[in-house]
Image (cartoon, helix red, strand yellow):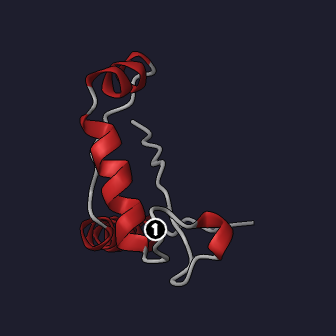
Amino acid sequence: MAEIFFFICSQRRMPPSAKIERTRHPEKLAKVAIEALKDAKVREVLETQAATPVGNTPAEFRAFIQAESAKYAKIVQLTGVKVK
């Protein structure tokens, strides 16, 4: 089973053109995205596309990616898979 992850990321200090509610802090962007994922219509659209909306905080997503990386690194090591 393959999994695909979609996420929103930004540099630590977003440029003024990307400001959300007058802040450059990425935590604010995360809050807005998480709130959007609570909307039933947004969830419905995503779910009809076979997506599972999660809405992690940046710290939760970072921990998830670190765990996934460790898991797949072990699989690569055990199988000897090489990238061409």
The quadrant in which the C terminus is found is: bottom right
Q: Residue at x 55, y 67 (%)?
A: 19
Residue 20 falls left or right of residue 67: right
**Residue occupied by mark 1:** 76
Q: Give residue 13's position: percent from left, percent from top.
A: 55, 84
Residue 42 falls left or right of residue 49: left
Q: Residue at x 62, y 68 (%)?
A: 82
Q: Quadrant of residue 30?
A: bottom left
Q: Give residue 25's position: percent from left, percent from top.
A: 43, 77
Quick check: 77 above or below 1?
below
Q: Give residue 66's position: percent from left, percent from top.
A: 33, 74
Q: Residue at x 45, y 21 (%)?
A: 49
Total marks placed: 1
Front one among 79 and 70: 70
Q: Is residue 76 visible?
A: yes
Quick check: 1 above or below 63?
above
Q: Give residue 69's position: percent from left, percent from top.
A: 39, 70
- Considering every residue shown, the one lying at the far right of the view is 84
Quick check: 71 above or below 1?
below
Q: Is residue 74 visible?
A: no
The quadrant in which the N terminus is found is: top left
